Image (cartoon, rainbow, N blue to C red):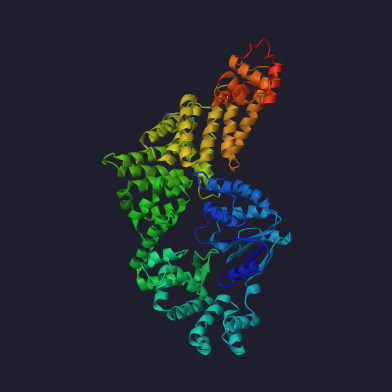
Amino acid sequence: MTLISAPAGYGKTTLVCEWIADCDRPAAWLSLEQGDNELTRFLTYLISALQTLSENIGEGVLSVLQSLQLIPTELAMTALLSELTAISSPFILVLDDYHAASSKEVDEALRFLLNHLPKQMHLVITTREDPAISLPRLRVLDQITELRAADIRFTFSEAEAFFNHVMDLNLSTDHIVEFQSLTEGWAAGLRLAAISIQEDHDADQLLRSFTGNHHFVLDYLVEEVLQRQPENMQAFLLQTSQLDRLCGPLCDALLLNPKVAGKEMLLDLERKNLFVIPLDKERRWYRYHHLFADILRRRSVEYYGANQIAELHKRASIWYEGSGFELEAFRHAIEAEDIERSSRLLQGRGMPLHLRGAARMTLNWLESLPAKELDARPELWVFYGSALLIAGKPTGVEHKLRAAEAAMEGVEQDARTRDLIGWIAATRATLASLMLTDNHDLAESNLQSAEAALQDTVLEDKTEGLVGLIGSSRNAEVRGTKGTNGIDNVIAQSRRALAYLRPDNLPARTASAWMLGVACQQRGNYAEAYEAYNEVITNCRKIDHQLMAAMAIIGIAQIREAEGRPDLAAERYRSALKLAGDLPHPVIKEAQMGLERMNRVLEDEMKGNRIEPLSQREIEVLELIAKGLSNREIAEKLFLALDTVKGHNRRIFEKLHVKRRTEAIARARELNLFMNTPKPH
């Protein structure tokens, strides 16, 4: 690992760029910024960066991240590392501006990566702050190279090369010594000084003003640089500074039909070294240097005022929405203080954004709104409660749900309000699942314990923990649960949710059906559980949600196991494993353990010669298999459809507890199934 840790403006990114340019190894580059500290977002961008090395890398983890279910950090990183280890040639991964994404869960992922770093992988981190990892341990093990501000600040000879050879200013030795001393070799200060001198060729005047700490110097020099730019360039810089990332069409949307296209302006900014950094090789997306953007934003508020800034954010939101970037559209709608637009975007075209990695953003926004605004939009109260649940704070959910119901009192029940009633029921079903107890007085205590357990994890999105807590009760013994806190309440609320939710509200319906299946399975009502799980499977085919479907199939397998049908249970466990593939998730281990358990049962049955009798037709098919005929030849011989023969094969194998033709023949001979068999007609 190489760690480059220094304050802003010391040229960390430039240093790594130049090093990689002279290095023979391929490199994956991830530029991080505020908001990338959500683990799901961080891993998504990390995998996208790594796919520049190998286009298929991390596809399994990425598909899980794009679903409703989150995965534990260790499982996600283990799956990703197994693919990285398979890359034979040495490569580099750069995490640029890591401080912007640092959070408990992202730091945990980094620590796990470092502890299992493949030998052919070189990790490079640039940051303004030391990451939360054990640097002393890495130093003792000689597994880290560190560069600090003292290592990368410009010396006199480097400053001279920069001023006189790169910027072609032909400054005197005295001028260079003074600039190098005043900036203490700070690369950003030297660059800003050079740009200012380029404009008026008066180094002495600049030196007289070039005093104070770095922040004051930066403010002064940005003022000097901005004032010397053409008016259209100044307007472009100030207005587009509201964006975290920039591209030509987005800039055009903000400036409303500018004379110079946004793409050309960005290329011009890059040529002029005006603190714009390309984020891809195609020069499509850029970002401003963080400090430069901060100062541009301060000036833009002073110059345009809050109303015009809000209008810029609204234009950005409209562009992002039209381009399919719903999360970014939502964020800019919030910045625009457009409650109506933010509310609509939050609904996410069928899947609310708080279910797609924006729970924290959603909660922060909703907490900032006065109650009257929420009352005017009951759906916000509903999403408020749902977002609290996703954040692992179930004790505060019921209050929001009651507020939603109060806001809907007297409102005519149209399709929209019925759907909200379904959402409320689905959320209450989750609460009831967390409160399950055989003692009514302990229900609230159970909810508090669940919240404590959820908050004990580092993940911001607690969906994984919620599923784990609910799923763990699936095989629990049911005792005398009471009143609304018992399992009957889970079933009642889940049924109510499915009765009221829109048919196309598949995420909420799928979750409700799964909870209904779990509760009915626990109650021993296998018929309704089976029906609920089948709805989950059907919905998952439509929304491409492999993991939830696998969980439902496992539920059906457990029901078949409880019914004493190990053959059918084993088939379901195999189906769940096949559907899930190599996706890292605890549910996969549950299916593997179930299949192993059923295989042991079936093996014991085989040893005791306890098999289900074969039908006459199945014996005829088996005899032709023993003669070496193919499925097609058997179909022609018996005048059957090919699919019918295949169905006979599958049932024969299940009844004989075998997997191959040769095993079926040997087993049949062992059981004397070929004796006195009528000749096939």
Residue 444 in sight:
no
Q: Residue at x 69, y 14 (%)?
A: 672
Q: Position of residue 424 (x, y in %)?
A: 38, 40
Image height of 525 relative to 234, above or below: above
Quadrant housing residue 509: top left
Residue 278 in sight:
yes
Q: Residue at x 50, y 68 (%)?
A: 290
Q: Position of residue 170 (x, y in %)?
A: 58, 88
Image height of 160 relative to 392, above or below: below
Report the side of 231 relative to 65 (left or right): left
Image height of 12 relative to 61, above or below: below
Report the side of 36 relative to 505 (left or right): right
Q: Position of residue 635 (x, y in %)?
A: 58, 22
**What quarter of the picture does the N terminus occupy?**
bottom right
Q: Position of residue 572 (x, y in %)?
A: 57, 30
Q: How many marks?
A: 0
Relative depth, front residue between 181 and 56: 56
Relative depth, front residue between 108 and 513: 513
Quadrant housing residue 311: bottom left
Relative depth, front residue between 484 and 519: 519
Image height of 363 relative to 201, above or below: above
Residue at the right extreme, as displayed: 141
Residue at the top extreme, as displayed: 676
**What quarter of the picture does the C terminus occupy?**
top right
